[in-house]
Amino acid sequence: MTVDMHRPQGTRRASAPRSPILTYHGITPWEADPGPRNPKYDVHPERFRDQLTHIRARGYEAMSLSAWWSGSGRRPVVLTFDDGWASMYERAWPLLADAGLHADCFVNTATIGSRGFLTWAQITEMQRHGMTFHSHSHEHVALSGLALGELERQVGDSKRLLEDRLGTAVQFLAAPYGLVNRRVVKAALAQGYHAICTSWNWLARPGARTINRAAVYRDTSLEEFDRLLRGSLVAYGPRVAREMVVHLPRLILLRAHVLNLNVFQEEHAP
């Protein structure tokens, strides 16, 4: 989506090697109507299948975010899905099951059951078969622009609702639009989250309170995908440079309340 403005700090395992944490959104045939989604984030099912095959062929271990964050894994990669689109159940999950790989899903609890999004029955079924679910806030709003009370409601209500319905602890929050600052981190930790996932395109370190993630786009080739897995600067460097040039000035204006928050959210819809 866009770059966060809070770089990782407070890492508990400073000596641990960094790992690729990849972010997907929709797994959708390109001829399909994307609806409200930005088609930039739609990965074709066949391309997704090729990426999963590549992970296995190269000997990576696709593990849960929780296990990775705790320091497990010899050659780990974490696959995450944002927003809770129905294609997670319809297309992504069957392909993950065929490949024997795991993914973590971040859902907006306000949209569960809405048209185009996952239902509670689908989420429960996937959880029974090993998928893990976390919070993407309640209503997919830019958390860093909220008053404290609304910020606490967005991160707290979604966590409690997921825990009540799924019967398991929700340990991680993915900030919508990647907008993270110290207030968001503090509020999330106070609600009991272990860490906050961002959209900063860089490798991540286990135990950090903010977790970098690299987006997989519609046009991400298998060659670039391999570079993301290997942590190549050829893949990550241009992404970081673009974020600094294109997104950072807009986020500074947003923080200064020069740019309207609602306009920003419309322009950066997932």
Image (cartoon, rainbow, N blue to C red):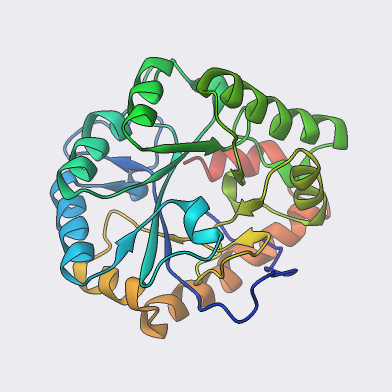
* Picture residue at 68% right of the left edge, 68% below the top: 7
Give how far across and how far down residue 260 sits, in percent.
73, 42
In the depicted structure, whether residue 34 falls above or below residue 51: above
Quarter of the rendering containing residue 126: top left
Residue 86 in the figure: left or right of residue 165: left
* Picture residue at 43% right of the left edge, 51% below the top: 64
In the depicted structure, whether residue 136 falls above or below residue 245: above
Q: Is residue 262 visible?
A: yes
Quarter of the rendering containing residue 229: bottom left
Give how far across and how far down residue 244 sits, in percent.
60, 72
In the depicted structure, whether residue 165 falls above or below residue 177: above
Pick whichever, 246 or 37, lies toward us.
37
* Picture residue at 67% right of the left edge, 41% below the top: 142
Give how far across and how far down residue 266 sits, in percent.
57, 38
Q: Is residue 117 visible?
A: no
Give how far across and how far down residue 246 sits, in percent.
56, 67
Residue 55 in the figure: left or right of residue 176: left
* Picture residue at 54% right of the left edge, 23% below the top: 167
Pick whichever, 198 or 268, lies toward us.
198
